Amino acid sequence: MAFYEDAKAVKKTDSPEKYQKERKPGQRPSSPGIYKCQSCGYEDVINRECDTLPPCANCDKKPHAWKLLVTATDK
């Protein structure tokens, strides 16, 4: 779950389909941000330098997938 202090610094998406797609470890992330493991609920930060999504560091459930929760931007 993402928390924020400044409501002006966050905005609701106008493309929700980006947040519905599941991605597997080894696949390219759609963007930098916070991703949630669909097996155990662990959340991880994926930065701009990350070319592929890692395995979940919290669980050993296989297969598992990630969903984007929060996109990080410079806007």
Image (tube, rainbow, N blue to C red):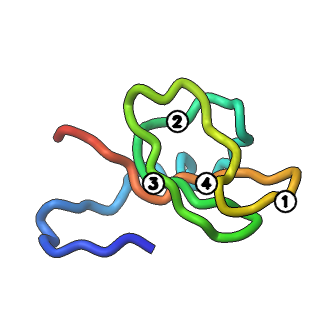
The residue that mark 3 highlights is 34
Q: Residues within 10 Å of mark 3 (few under 14, many from 20)?
A: some
Q: Residues within 10 Å of mark 1 (few under 14, many from 20)?
A: few
- Distance CA(mark 3)–CA(mark 1): 20 Å
- Horizontal side of 58 relative to 15 (left or right) equals right
- Distance CA(mark 2)–CA(mark 3): 11 Å
The mark that comes first in sequence, 3 or 1, is 3
Quadrant of res 53: top right
Q: How many marks?
A: 4
- Horizontal side of 44 relative to 27 (left or right) equals left
The residue that mark 2 highlights is 30
| Residue 45 rendering spot, x and y as whole percentages | 44, 50
| Residue 32 rendering spot, x and y as whole percentages | 41, 39
| Residue 41 rendering spot, x and y as whole percentages | 64, 70
Amino acid residing under circle 2 = Ser
The mark that comes first in sequence, 1 or 4, is 1
Amino acid residing under circle 3 = Ile
The mark that comes first in sequence, 4 or 2, is 2
20 relative to 2, above or below:
above
Q: Residues within 10 Å of mark 4 (few under 14, many from 20)?
A: many
The residue that mark 4 highlights is 67
**Element marked by disc 3:** strand
- Distance CA(mark 1)–CA(mark 2): 23 Å
Q: Quadrant of the C terminus?
A: top left
- Distance CA(mark 1)–CA(mark 4): 16 Å
The mark that comes first in sequence, 1 or 2, is 2
Pick whichever, 15 or 40, lies toward us: 40
| Residue 55 rendering spot, x and y as whole percentages | 70, 45
- Distance CA(mark 3)–CA(mark 4): 9 Å
